[in-house]
Amino acid sequence: MNNTNPLAGDTLVLTGTSVTKAIAEYIQKLGGQAVHLPLIEVVERTAEDHEKFIASMDAEWLIFTSQSAVRFFKQKLIRYGYTAAHWHGKVAVVGEKTAAALSAIGFTIDFMPSIYSADVFIKEFQPAIVEKCVFFRGNLAKSTIPDGLNCDVECYTVYDTVQTARHMPALNELLTERVTIIFASPSAVEVFEAHKASKPYHVAAIGHITKTALENAGEMNIIMPHTYTMRAVIDELVKQKGTN
C-alpha cells in the first residue's frame, strides 16, 4: 500500500442523497476518486404539516436521527417564520452530523447515544413516561424508537425517501476490483441489488442495519467501522488495505 496515497487507483462510490465537500476532498487527499451516484432521493412532506409543526413546540423532547430530518425541519422553520427560540424542550439526536446541523440553526443538544443507531438510542435514552417526545423522521424510518421508548412518542414525518435507479447504468460501468460502494441505508442496498451487473466490486456500510441488509442480499467481506460516519468508513477502508 502507498502510505502517502493509500487509496491510489481506488474509486469510492457514495450512494447517499448528498456528499459534503469535505468528504470528497478527504478521499482525494488519500489518492482515491469520489463518485456520487445516489440511489435514493429525499423530498419534503408538507401534507397536514402546519398543525404538527406547531404541536411539536409543546414537546419535552425533540428527537432527530438523520441530517435529512433536520434539513426539512429547517425548511419548515423558514416557511412558517419560527426560530429555535420557540421550542423549549430538550433535543436528542443520533449522529455527530445531525447534532451539528441542529446546532447550526440554534438548538442545543442534550442527548446523543454512544453508538449512532436507533436500537442503541432506545437503550441509552429513557425519558420520563409522562414526557411528550416528538420524533422527526422520514417515511421509511422503522418503529424502533416509538416502540422502544416508555414516553409518549408522536411521529412527525417531515420527508419521504424515494428509491431511484437512474444512476445504476453509470454505477455498473464503474464496477471493478478497485471500486468500493458505500451504503448508508437499506433502501440504497435494495436498488443496487435489483439492478447490479455481474462484475467485481467491494461494499462498505454505515451502520449495522445497512450491513445486515447487505448480508441478507448475499454480500460478503463488508467493511463497517465502529463509528457510523462516512469519514470512519473511509478510515476503515484505508486500515484494511494496510493489513492486506
Image (cartoon, grey):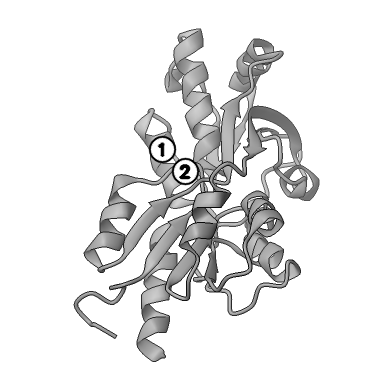
Could one spot residue 37 in this view of the protein? yes
Q: Which residue is denoted by mark 2 in the rendering?
A: 98
* 6 sits to left or right of 218: left
Q: Pointer 1 and pointer 2: residues touching (CB < 8 Å)? A: yes
Q: Nearer the viewer, residue 167 or 100?
A: 167
- Per the image, label 1 sits on a secondary structure element best described as helix
Quadrant of the image containing the C terminus: bottom left
Q: Position of residue 96 (x, y in %)?
A: 43, 51
> Crowding near pointer 1: few (<14 within 10 Å), some, many (20+)?
some
Q: Residue farthest to the right?
A: 147
Q: In the image, what residue occupies the spot 45% across and 58% down?
A: 13
Residue found at the very far left of the displayed protein: 4
The residue identified by callout 1 is 101
Q: Residue at x 58, y 74 (%)?
A: 222
Helix, strand or loop at disc 2?
helix
What's the residue at 73%, 66% (across, down)? 217
